[in-house]
Image (tube, rainbow, N blue to C red):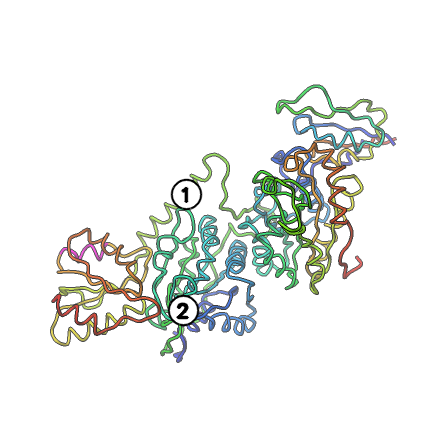
Amino acid sequence: MKQVFKKPSSMTDTPFSYCAGCGHSIVHRLMGELFDEMDIAGDVITVAPVGCAVTAYNFFNVDFSEAAHGRAAAVATGIKRVHPDKVVISYQGDGDLAAIGTAETIHAANRGENITVIFINNSVYGMTGGQMAPTTLLDQKTTTSPYGRTAEREGMPLKITEMIAVLDAPAYVVRTAVNTVGNVIKTKKYIKKGLTLQMEKKGYSLIEVLSQCPTGLGMSPLDTSKIWINKMQEYYPLGILKNKYDI
Amino acid sequence: MGEKVLIKGNEAMAESAIRNGCRFYFGYPITPQNEVPAYMSKRMPQIEGTFIQSESEIAAINMVFGASAAGARVMTSSSSPGISLKQEGLSYLAGAHLPCVLANIQRGGPGLGNIGPAQGDYFQATKGGGHGDYHLIVLAPSTAQEMADLTYAAFDYADQYRTPVMILGDATVGQIMEAVTLPDFRKEPLPNKPWALTGAKNRKANIARSYFGKEGELLKNNIELQKKYTLIKKELVLYEEYQTQDAEWIFVAFGTSARIAKSIVNQFREEGKKVGLIRPITLWPFPQDIIAQYADTIKGYFVIEMNYGQMVEDVKLAVSGKVPVEFYGIAAGFLPYELEIIERLKKLL
Amino acid sequence: MKGQIKIDIERCKGCSYCVNACPVKILKMSEKTNTHSYQYAEMIDMNKCTGCKACAIMCPEIAINVWIVEE
């Protein structure tokens, strides 16, 4: 008998503190698998956001820094400039990256900081109980958009990833999801490419992951996966938005 | 000793930082400290250091957090409104026990204010402008020479105590050009930082954090912080006594105010009047013991500040009502008017 | 190819991703609950397992280990 699937060694035994069906858990595991497979656990420094993943460091055996809300890209910049040969990841949610952190996100991308940004987009603010996010969809009801988002009142959902893709410096910008086996496998490939580009000093990459937040959306995990993530893709289509290197 | 140069306070500060191992500077332009990012942008590439003009003061302090967590000697600088922006970051740095040096070259406030010299950020600097129970070590240079010397020392204090250190200057001491003997380049290796984020190869993972959600953990971190501050209060109180031995009235003033106070002391001493000056150099920890000590023997203290009364409260606390504490304050970008102070002091003597 | 899986029922939060992902439909949600009060996933017929790992790939909790039974 050959074991073909087990917990990555770069992850701790601590069970995830996330809700049932949460996309964070899946993406965390993909990162752990890649740290093992690429043998980089000893070189990785990850910046955790403010949000549900604020204590992401509990689940990994790698160096971590917290960051003030929205500032992970700036913290990652500081770390990467000190350790250009280490693998620096900025892991952020939609509020962290696209609301309070918009300036830091755009400028780190524009400077072409040699980091890998993993953007968990679940269309809602999970940690604080389900408020509207920049990526909340039109008509979506949240605790701070109880009548449903409208373009006139709250503005259209922000296409931050498209904005980043327009910049000159970023090497790789992609939007993916983790709601199906196929998408999970693709997401792992995309994150691997982002990390590889960093290690080859080829610049900045952003991997946006449409992610299930069953609690924030008030739906079952499977409904979130099948209905909501598909609905998100109508406005936020999956695909490669920018690709400088075919590796 | 390094070379003697005619140099602006702001630039003396920047060069001294570099000479004590600072190789990372992140900052944003704001008058009256624009010489600092400009100097760093030119100097850092010369020594294989890193300069980033950040997108804001907020981004800068968070880059400082990252670089400090990664184990580097790192600096940022700004002026009053920009320092307000950095307060959250400073609270995080303090809570995470991270060293750094930052300079506040104060200007007139509140709000956008003006670009003249002021000391209106004393409360913000010493009582903790950010949230939570923490302190910065606060150093108050009075001359361009002290901009150099105190900044050099600040990096050692920061690493020794694992805490942010603030150079609290003002537009005058930042802009003034004086003869300065620059410090020598540091020869000793930088202190080892086993807690730094360097990649967890062959060791347990390090985490830079100020968030402690599990029961009792935040209390533990706060107890550690308070222990540290008690130690700093014991070990790092710096001040200058000038003509205090037989003084009947003693000025208390810091930074640029102290220069004016000193010149008034000289004038009165020439006429045989017994006047002196205590010049706090660390504003936190505040030199309360020496001020309490003289309160037993003198007739009174005369506090001069470029604000409406901030450090005077700490003087009054130290004096505990034993003697009168007179106050002269001027703000909004103006320097203290010597003649007014002289007239008031004549009446007191 | 024959496969074998083991589900750590204490880690399972009952999200049902594995049940939904299994291409041969041999997983189901149990009526029983674990000590955290989650209904957990359980195997219907291990003999039909192909070792495709779809369940483990979808499982957010890393609750499933997979083996290939070598011929």
3D distance between C-alphas at marks 2 and 1:
37 Å
Residue C42, placed above or below residue A41? above
Circle nearer the N terminus (2, 1)? 2
Neighbour class for label 2 at 10 Å: few (<14), some, many (≥20)?
Answer: some
* Magenta region includes residue A204: no
Identified at 25% across, 72% down, the residue is: B337
Residue furthest bottom as drawn: B6
For marks 2 and 1, give the one nearer the viewer. Answer: 2
Instruction: Give the SS element for disc 2.
Output: loop
What segment is highlighted magenta in the picture? B289-296
Instruction: State the residue position of label 2.
Output: B114
Tell me where residue B22 appears, x and y as whole percent: 49, 65
Residue A127, placed above or below residue B176? above
The amino acid at mark 1 is Asn
Residue B298, picture quadrant: bottom left
The amino acid at mark 2 is Asn
Identified at 34% across, 64% down, the residue is: B119
Tell me where residue B71 appears, x and y as whole percent: 52, 56
* Magenta region includes residue B295: yes
Tell me where residue B240 appears, x and y as whole percent: 26, 65
In this view of the protein, which residue sits in the foreground, B155 or B101?
B101
Q: Quadrant of the N terminus of chain B?
A: bottom left
